[in-house]
Amino acid sequence: MDVPLPDRMRRVVETLGPTFVKIGQIVAMRPDYVPTEYALALRKLQDHAEPFGSESARRVVEAELGQRLDELFANFEPEPFAAASLAQVHRATLPDGRRVAVKIQRPGAGSQMRDDLELLAFLARRLERRAPEVLGFRPSAMVAELRDTTLRELDFRQEARTCERVGRYFAGRDDVVIPWIDSDRSTERVLTMQLIEGVSPAPAAVLLEQGLDVDRLLDTGARAMLEQLFTLGLFHADPHPGNLLFLPGDRVAFLDFGMFGRLNTRNRRKLALMVWALVQGDFDAVAGQLLDFATRAPGADPEAFRDALDDVVQDWYAGKANASIARLLVRELGLGARFGIVFPRDLVLVARALVGLEATTTLVVPERSFRELLEPLVGDIRDAVLPSVAQLKDVLEHHRFDYLQLALDLPDLLGDLLPDLARRLRNGPPNPVELQREPMPDRPSPGWLLLAATTTGAAAGWLAAATARGRGSSA
């Protein structure tokens, strides 16, 4: 039986070893770098590797931490309980009796990864010169991003800081568990954290036998991811079943923050609007939000992208048998490459996070769609987009003098602008050639001034009311 070419490529990647497996997993979430069928095949890569010896592990720990192993730990299990391409993990006990997991970087992994990336960069440049038709997939840009991502994963201090920050956000919560970090026993190549032991995601019947509430677990996991995405702006980018544990009391633990993403406030709002529109089936809004995230390559065709995306989203929303949010997100990114729409890394990591969460949901309850999981959370998503009255008041309070100054300057600005605006309205739309020659005015545009007038008018009214309340209270 003939094996499809994408699957043959996946087997070659697995044969090349751990470094290329890790790279393949990253590329799997960038179908704007490789054709969609190859991205889907690479998603099947498994990051398992033969463990390295306990003596090598001991040498790395002692060299990094500057003490003997028996001084650092009351007990250290020589056999790892997990091994991957970049590191392996050992159970250990601290002198105070607390149980920890010690993540140790594979000897030579850093130098091997850098050498492989240099080779890939050379091949990418050569491919771009010899096969210009691949430029749409940006091979050199792909390798540059791979380098940034893998070098960040090689520095365990990044993972420690992310884990600590997410842990502070969920501190005091009894439904979400983030492992604490032992910073005294953590470096660039060694990471010591709380050992969390629980039940791995499994079919619902298995979890019920453990006394766990399946619906509550899935709801908790989904809510925790939405909070990371929309409230914190720092999120676990790979919450697949291997990086989650279910604990007694229907708690969910997030493990391994080596792959994480960040979203600034503006992008959080855009993402919330996109997910909200997706759940509600507003296909045009989904396309609009995706385009708002993206940059456009020369010759991009955003309208054709909208039309193609509309078909993809409608198929998914209609609940066809082979439709899933994972396939939807992969195809969206692939469509971007076809029409010159370039998506940022952060959006790709969001996609990866949602794909991982969907994989967990499907494993536990195969008949439940990801859309059904998100529908009860639409209110939370909406709250992430729409500011409260208290938040608006805080903004106005913080910028009250800026708004007041703008309100005071507005009459003079309008006086300068109105004659020019009247002339433009009488003369009709300007000739495009004349518009190109005309220098940009120093004065604000009419639209901007209209917005400023509205905003500052509201601000001035609020300030006046606040002042009046202040006078009344002091009388």
Image (tube, helix red, strand yellow):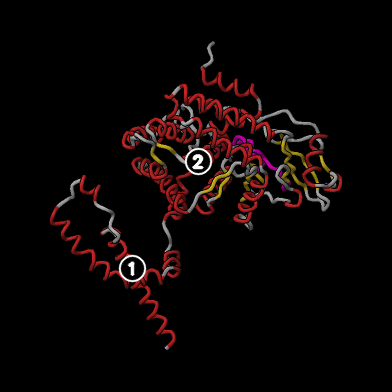
Q: Residue at x 54, y 31 (%)?
A: 27
Decide which of 374, 131 is in the foreground and name it. 131
Residue type at numbered disc 2: Arg
Q: Position of residue 144 (x, y in %)?
A: 54, 36
Q: Residue furthest bottom?
A: 475
Q: What is the secondary structure assignment of the residue under circle 1?
A: helix
Q: Is residue 194 part of the magenta span, yes or no? A: yes
Can residue 221 be seen here? The reply is: yes
The number of numbered discs placed on residues in the rendered structure image is 2
How packed is label 2: few (under 14 Cα within 10 Å), some, or many (20 or more)?
Answer: some
Q: Residue at x 16, y 61 (%)?
A: 422
Residue linked to disc 2: 345
The segment highlighted magenta reads: 192-211
Q: Quadrant of residue 244?
A: top right
How packed is label 1: few (under 14 Cα within 10 Å), some, or many (20 or more)?
Answer: many
Q: Quadrant of residue 255?
A: top right
Residue linked to disc 1: 456
Q: What is the secondary structure assignment of the residue under circle 2?
A: helix
Q: Position of residue 131 (x, y in %)?
A: 45, 22
Q: Do tag 1 and tag 2 residues touch (Cβ < 8 Å)?
A: no
Q: Position of residue 64 (x, y in %)?
A: 77, 44
Can residue 280 be seen here? The reply is: no
Q: Residue at x 52, y 41 (%)?
A: 349
**Where is 181 relative to 451, above or below?**
above
